[in-house]
Amino acid sequence: MTTAEPTVPTVPDVPDAGGRSRAIARAVWSLIWPIAVAVVIVVLGWMAFLQFFAVNSAVGKTPADVWNYLVADPGAADNRRVVFGSLAQTLLDAVLGYAGGLAAALVLALVFVLFAPVEQAFMPIVMLLRSVPLVAMTPVILLAFGRGAGGVAVIGGVVVFFPAMVNIMLGLRSMPRQVSELVLAYGGSRITVIRKVGLPSALPALFASARISVPAALIGALVAEWLATSGGIGGAIPNAIGGFDYDQVWSDIAADLHPGRGGRVGRPDGLRPPHPPLSPSPLCPTFVLSCPTFVRVSSTVAWPPGVTGPRRRLRAWDSCA
């Protein structure tokens, strides 16, 4: 008589401290090297521009001049306070326009996707407004919303709004047709389709819009400050030019360069993320985003006579196991 040997449970390997350190170092390096390369390219291009066009040294300042103005000069502390105070105001104005523009783009994209007549009525107006230059729209915006935070947020939001709205609409309409039909067949409404299928499908487009909107929000904030508030970087540069303080002009430009770089959002290869894990329940009580046989089920089921409309039940649902 033989006895079965007891099985010893295996313990998964735990990565050592050296492996974690190397992973952290690779992550930090992947974050630092693009910034370092961008800084080197900007500095070399800056110096080449001044040399190639023979810009007068009283007007065109080199990176060394900016460094001396912000760090080495006796009054560098006061200079930094002026420059970075203006930068903080510009970033605050950019955040207002960024958040307002993205929120308005998301809401209007949802309305246009849910209600086709609304899109047909208002999309031409939206595209017409998009063709009007922002400088021409700014006086009207200032008359309507004032020269305070509201007017700045609207001007910045206009720059962010249009490309983000179109991108999010495309993302919402990229949802798989079979999955949306499956939700409708199981009794879901159009709002449920958007909430369970459309919004997850539009996340890559939403993240891409969030990324490309960062420099647009900064541009909108600079335009608003230049034409409306006379504060921040957009107002400091014309004031410094009027006072022939080109050290501050170039320092303001250099301080405003780095925030304009959008960070990485999403996968670097541009591919869409995979769907969530499949539900193991054969009844699929929640509107799962994917099913191994949902394409075959939703396209080949023979519906009984008289069962029509968006709320028809899926009789072959048990095949989604």
Image (cartoon, rainbow, N blue to C red):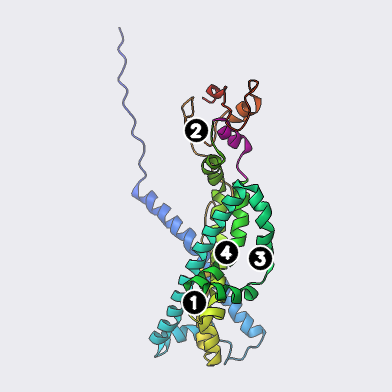
10 Å crowding of disc 3: few (<14), some (14-19), many (20+)? some
Residue occupying image coordinates x 56% and y 26%: 313
Q: Which residue is mark 2?
A: 278
Amino acid type for the residue under numbered disc 1: Ala
| Percent coordinates x, y for residue 220 in the rendering | 56, 71
Which is nearer the eye, 18 or 229? 229
SS of the residue at dot 4? helix
Which is nearer the eye, 31 or 249? 249
N-terminal of the two: label 4 or label 3? 3
Bounds of the magenta segment: 174-186
**Marks 4 & 3, CB-CB < 8 Å contact:** no
N-terminal of the two: label 2 or label 3? 3
Q: CA distance from mark 3 to mark 1?
A: 32 Å
Callout in the foreground (4, 1): 4
Looking at the image, is 21 positioned above or below residue 304? Answer: below
Callout in the foreground (2, 4): 4
Q: Which residue is mark 4?
A: 160
Q: Is residue 185 magenta?
A: yes
Predominant secondary structure, magenta span: helix
N-terminal of the two: label 2 or label 4? 4
Q: For residue 129, which numbered disc appears in the image? A: 3
Amino acid type for the residue under numbered disc 2: Leu
Q: CA distance from mark 4 to mark 1?
A: 22 Å
10 Å crowding of disc 1: few (<14), some (14-19), many (20+)? some
Callout in the foreground (3, 1): 3
Q: CA distance from mark 4 to mark 3?
A: 13 Å
Looking at the image, is 136 positioned above or below residue 241? Answer: above
Q: Which residue is mark 1?
A: 255
Amino acid type for the residue under numbered disc 3: Leu
